[in-house]
Amino acid sequence: MARSGLDETSASGAFVKTASTFRNFISRDPNSQFPAEFGRYHLYVSYACPWASRCLSYLMIKGLDKAISFTPVKPKWDRTRETDEHMGWVFPSSETEEPGAKPDPLNGAKSIRDLYDIASPNYTGKCTVPVLWDKKLKTIVSNESGEIIRMLNTEFNAMAENAALDLYPPHLQAKIDETNEWVYHGINNGVYRCGFARKQEPHEEALKEVFDALDKCEEILGKQRYICGNTLTEADIRLFVSLIRFDEVYALHFKCNKKLIREYTNLFNYTKDIFQLPGISSTVNIQHIKLHYYGSHPTINPFGIIPVGPNTDYSTPHGREKFSA
């Protein structure tokens, strides 16, 4: 079984992402196995990981960071055991070791792998982030970001500071699901299929799909403020976490350099628009993003050289207000 994304390559040389394994659901029903309770749950994240950053974005935009605590790991993968060669997400040993990363405050874990071992002693799968942790039962509720953000959208509204914000409104759910599907295949996972491909043909196939999807986004965003209309939705958060990483790492590290996001008029301004939403900029740590990708994939970047640029400014005016009330 794959232990990290670097292991998920088929015989044809194509990257094939495996599914998450912990798929429990927190419910507002007080009688459920995992009821929504203030202070009960903890989110382990990496600022570098787009899947984890989705969840952190929801914590901030919904105003749930007081109800659900979180801990960021170190950006660069390291040895998770002295007894084997597994490389993965690790915690710093002190508050000052790695700016932006924190030691595990709950279990004293040295790595995310340790948390998986606590939750399931015989676990042999990938030890990924995000990890939504139940402090009471001392176990993993979920490591599936797409399901975690749905929980954060609705099940904690009784304690959310921005409970009125619904990022998956009933009248747009079909449109959001459809958009998520092609954005995931073409962009979110598409860049990984480019970067982790080990043969030219699957790389080029994935690259075409990436830029077909980006071109589609550019066209849509020339007519409306957000990807599903003039209302901010889940689909925007899921798209944004890939766009904000594109010019910094995907273009060079994953060889997706056919065109940069800042060369797309609508996509670039849209990325700035989402970045400037209250709370979102705090979830973007470009230094962690670059340290992780360029420093954790030795088969792609064996010397771990980290590019200095491009250091794009996403705080400048975006002009997207013209599309929506």
Image (cartoon, grey):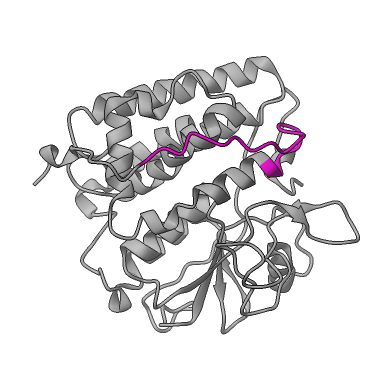
At 47% from the left and 25% from the top, the residue drawn is 210
Q: Is residue 252 found left or right of 215 in the rendered image?
A: right
At 41% from the left and 32% from the top, the residue drawn is 182
**Residue ranking furthest to the front:** 308
Does residue 18 appear anywhere in the picture?
no
Q: Is residue 232 found left or right of 8 in the rendered image?
A: left
Q: Position of residue 74 (x, y in %)?
A: 64, 59
Say whether residue 207 is magenta: no
Identify which residue, 64 or 139, lies in the foreground: 64
Q: Is residue 64 found left or right of 120 in the rendered image?
A: left
Q: Position of residue 253 (x, y in %)?
A: 61, 31
Residue 208, placed above or below residue 89: above
* Magenta: main secondary structure: loop
Quadrant housing residue 317? top left
**Residue ranking furthest to the left:** 325
Say whether residue 310 is magenta: yes
Q: Position of residue 229 (x, y in %)?
A: 20, 39
Identify which residue, 128 or 312, lies in the foreground: 312
Identify which residue, 53 or 168, lies in the foreground: 53
Identify which residue, 35 or 52, lies in the foreground: 52
Q: Position of residue 40 (x, y in %)?
A: 49, 81
At 72% from the left and 24% from the top, the residue drawn is 198
Residue 151, placed above or below residue 159: above
Residue 141, placed above or below residue 320: below
Does residue 101 appear anywhere in the picture?
yes
Q: Which residues are magenta?
A: 295-313
At 55% from the left and 23% from the top, the residue drawn is 206
